Image (tube, grey):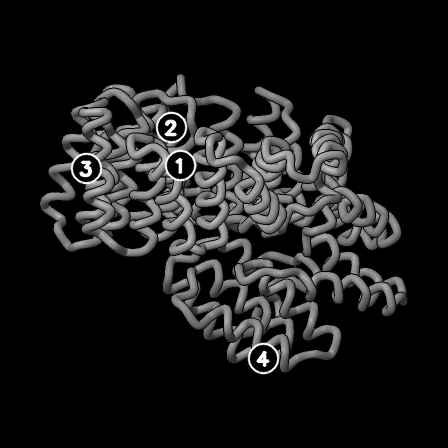
Amino acid sequence: MRLRHILYIPALALAFTINAQQINPITKAVLDGYTQTLKENPKDFETLYQRAAQYYSLSMYDNALADVVRAIDCTPTKEKDYLMREFALLADIDIELKEYSKALSAVDKALDLNPDSYPDLYRKGNILLHLKDGEAAYRTFYSMQRLKSRSQEAYFGMAKARLLTGQKGEAEALMKEALNADPTNPVSFCRIGDLYREMGDNRQAAANYLSAFALGSSSDRPLQSMIRIAADDFQSMADAIEYALSRSDNQIPLLFLKGNIANHTGNYPQAYEAFSSLLKIPAGQAPTVYAAMAEACLALDKTDEANANISTALEKENSVESLILRSRISRAAGHPADALLSATKALEGDPGNAEALVQTALANIDLKNYPDALKALNETVLSDPENPLPLMLRAHINDQWLGNPKAAVADRNRVSSFPTEKFPETAFKALAKARNGKRIDADEIIGNALKNSPSKDDCYWAAVYYAQTGNLEEAKQWRDRAVSLGFSNLYLLNSNTTPGLNLKPLSHL
């Protein structure tokens, strides 16, 4: 479930750990086969290694560790190739467990068996970076060059090591060498961008990510990197795109990129400006552009303009995503029946779509059709059980309108048990606790989450929490702080009516 498309704010993924119940049937059959083989021969080191590798791929690191340690114990010393692979896997597991000293010991044992193993040298160099041993890391990466004289991995590794030792000039020189080794590869520019990010130079990082994007790679890595920069420092990303616009005859992809990054990072005035420019160009009048413009307009509380743009988008292409957006716009404009119609059409195109189901529920709440709203939320919870939003909405309906407080308490208990330290999920968790009578615990959750440089979105969600729990002065302070940090979603600030998750208590302040 992408909360951004429901509450119109950038989403933060819910963290969860893979467990046995989430393993697909084919993988489970493979694991069962390994287990059966090991019952017959518990010292089968090859099968132990293979099962460890399978567990590792599933992020089941404790299981993988147990198997690979047993595999090493059972492997004859003459089986050097297997021992090398086992020690390398042990190092990888230790890295995931953040046991870097143990990982270093494991990879050294692999290198004792083959000092010229390029992958193990690279693995060792990165472990040493984790251990903040810049000089040893530099020597390790440097030794890779005798195996591959123009190794990009070696150049970038040496550059990272020099950054650790404060030698920025030498790091930049090594970055240039790395680029010269493969100047048309977008990954080269992404790696350079990553290093400039480590240096704190967002402008150079943005320029390199944009170069990677311009090379036409099918990978979304440069785009995701640009979004990450823009989330912290939109101006650096915008400046890089503006510079590219000033030097390019083809404005369309750059304007589209700027607008979408602005939308994704909550910089809606800039998104509106970019899409306005794009829609003045006939070749830029695509359905995706009209839909993106509608999204920006909704955030800026321009509901009539949002509706006009989404209507045009749907005339050009009748997509499920655009129908969901029109449902949101119709609700914002005070037309819940139209919102319900659009959400229903979206479900016809994609039965079970979680976003469409939540919009169906919200429209039914506005229409006071609470049983129908509950039905849609029940389906959403079944398909997306780790998402707090439908649980909170379902609890609200049961508590406020259907006279079922026990069900409401149960749903809020589920939400309050979710392991998360990020917003907006933290706000849901705290609200769930507060509404179940644990206000002291709830305040502590929010307070701890806000200790370290909260973002504009974090501040908005803090304001929602305090507004909904009756601390209006505190809510106003966090709302004002969100705005001062650049929070520009006027719909959420002024008009949002999502039950129990809005700033309406502050409307008189």
Position of 496 with respect to 131 (left or right) is right
Dot in front, 3 or 1: 3
Q: Amino acid at mark 1?
A: Gly
Q: Earlier in the sequence, mark 3 or mark 2?
A: 3
Dot 2 falls on a residue whose secondary structure is helix
Give 197 or 121, whichever is nearer the viewer: 121
Q: Earlier in the sequence, mark 3 or mark 1?
A: 3
Report which residue position mark 4 lands on. 471
Dot in front, 3 or 4: 3
Report which residue position mark 2 lands on. 278
Dot 4 falls on a residue whose secondary structure is loop
Position of 312 with respect to 289 (left or right) is right
Report which residue position mark 3 lands on. 142
Residue 317 % position (x, y): 60, 21
User: CB under 8 Å between callouts 1 and 2?
Assistant: yes
Residue 172 against residue 507 in the figure, above or below: above
Dot 1 falls on a residue whose secondary structure is helix
Residue 239 visible within the image: no
Q: Amino acid at mark 3?
A: Tyr
